[in-house]
Amino acid sequence: MMTGTLICYTMGSDVTAVVRNRLRKQLLGYKDHSNNGKYSYDRDGLLTEIPSIRLIRSVFIVKNDDKDKVLDLLERYNVKYFVRKVILEKEDCHILEINEEE
């Protein structure tokens, strides 16, 4: 039985839109445009660099080994978060690149 880590987070209503967007960009990545939109670049975020499953807004599953990287980022923004271990389905293991023998 393989397990992963489910993380969900929320930001208070006192957080500005600038801070919300900064966290979202660092977490999820974004598309950068230059030269009046002539060129576009995909900028990676933490969840594009590590295998993850995004369930809904602010809720995602990562490997147990990658949990601390995500929590460190959320703590830098003083975000309220919840962490739970979850049992992974076979297709989740493929997405998260977990060997089923582990």
Image (cartoon, rainbow, N blue to C red):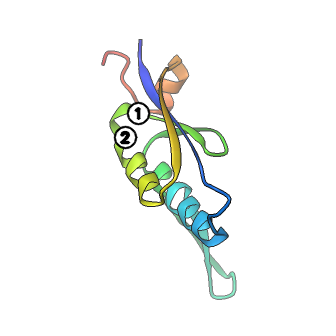
Looking at the rendered structure, which numbered label has been put on residue 101?
A: none
Percent from the top left, x then y, of residue 2?
41, 17
List the single residue furthest toward the top: 1
Is disc 1 placed on a helix, strand or loop?
A: loop
Q: Which secondary structure, mark 2?
A: helix
Q: Residue at x 33, y 36 (%)?
A: 65
Up-down relation of residue 93 to residue 1 (above or below): below
Image position of 75 with respect to 38: above or below: above
Q: CA distance from mark 1 to mark 2?
A: 5 Å
| Residue occupying the point 43% across, 51% down | 49
CB atoms at circles 1 and 2 under 8 Å apart?
Answer: yes
Q: Position of residue 97 (x, y in %)?
A: 41, 32
For mark 2, what is the residue?
66
> Residue 63: which disc?
1
Q: Quadrant of the C terminus?
A: top left
- Nearest the viewer among 51 and 6 is 6
Residue in the picture at 39% in, 39% down: 67
Q: Quadrant of residue 28?
A: bottom right
Residue 22 image point, x, y percent: 55, 67
Which residue type carries mark 1?
Lys
Which amino acid type is shown beneath numbered disc 2?
Asp
Camera-side residue: 40 or 70?
Answer: 70
Q: Quadrant of residue 58?
A: top right
| Mark 1 neighbour density, 10 Å: few (under 14) some (14–19) many (20 or more) | many
Residue 33 found in image quarter: bottom right
